[in-house]
Image (cartoon, rainbow, N blue to C red):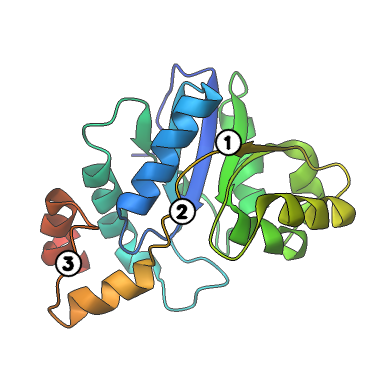
Amino acid sequence: MTEPPPTDAQTVLLYGGTFDPPHVGHLTMAQVALEQTGVDEVWFLPAPSPPHKLDVSDDTFEWRLRMVGALISDCKGLRAMPLEAFLKRPSYTIDTVRAVQTWYPQVKFSFLLGTDALAGLPQWHGAEELSQRIDFVVAVREGFPRTDTIEQVMRELPSIRIRGIEMPLLDISSTWLRQRLETGRSVCHLIPPQVLDVWHVGPKGME
C-alpha cells in the first residue's frame, strides 16, 4: 500500500493505542462509542513505535494490526487502519491528527480515549494545538472519575471540547494479558479465539 486507504465516511472517531494485544475491553469501548456518538466509523490506529513505550517496536506493527482486524472482523462500523505506517518516527498524536485531516478533508474527526489517558493529555506533545484541532470522546476508566478529570484538564486546556460516553468499567490490561499468554496461562476469554490465532503466529509470521 503506497497511500492511505480511501473512505466514504463523513464522521470518524479515532482510537489509538498499541493494542498489544487487543482485547474485549478495546472492542467494548469502540462499539459503545460508535453507538453513542453516531459516527459513521471508529478507526483503530495501532501505533508502530509510540514515543512513550520503548518496548513496542515497528517490527510488531503488522502483527498488532492483524490482531485488531481479527478482533473487529464481524463488527460493522469498526475499522483497522494502518495510517501510522505512513508517518515519520517518532509519531505523536498531533502528527496523526494533522495527517488525517489533510488526507481526508471531507471527514469530521474526533478522538476516543479513557479518562486515564485524558488526565495526562495536557502533557502530550502539541497538546494545545491538539485540543483546538479535534473533539474528544471520553469513557471512564478505573481511578479517574469523569467529572473531576475533565475539570482538571479543562483548567489546563481551556479550549478543549469533550463529550462523555457511558460504558461499563472494564479494567482489563493488555500488559497483564500479554504476561499470561507468554507464560501459557488462561486469558479468561478476554481475548477472542480469532485474535489468539494471530497472536500465536507471532510477528515473524507476518513477514
Q: Which residue is mark 2?
A: 169
Q: Residue at x 42, y 78 (%)?
A: 55
33 in relation to 184, above or below = above
Inspect the image, locate mark 3, and give the three-letter code of the amino acid beneath it.
Gly
Q: In this rendering, would 85 be left or right of 183?
A: right
**Rendered-image quadrant of the C terminus:** bottom left
2 in relation to 143, above or below = above
Q: Which residue is mark 3?
A: 202
Residue 139 in the image: x percent, y percent? 56, 46
76 or 206, nearer to the observer: 76
Q: Earlier in the sequence, mark 3 or mark 2?
A: 2
Q: Quadrant of residue 62?
A: bottom left
Closer to the observer: label 3 or label 2?
A: 2
Q: Which residue is mark 1?
A: 100
Inspect the image, locate mark 1, and give the three-letter code of the amino acid beneath it.
Val
Residue 56 in the image: x percent, y percent? 41, 72
Residue 62 visible within the image: yes
Secondary structure type for disc 3: loop
2 or 173, nearer to the observer: 173
Inspect the image, locate mark 2, and give the three-letter code of the amino acid beneath it.
Leu
Closer to the observer: label 2 or label 1?
A: 2
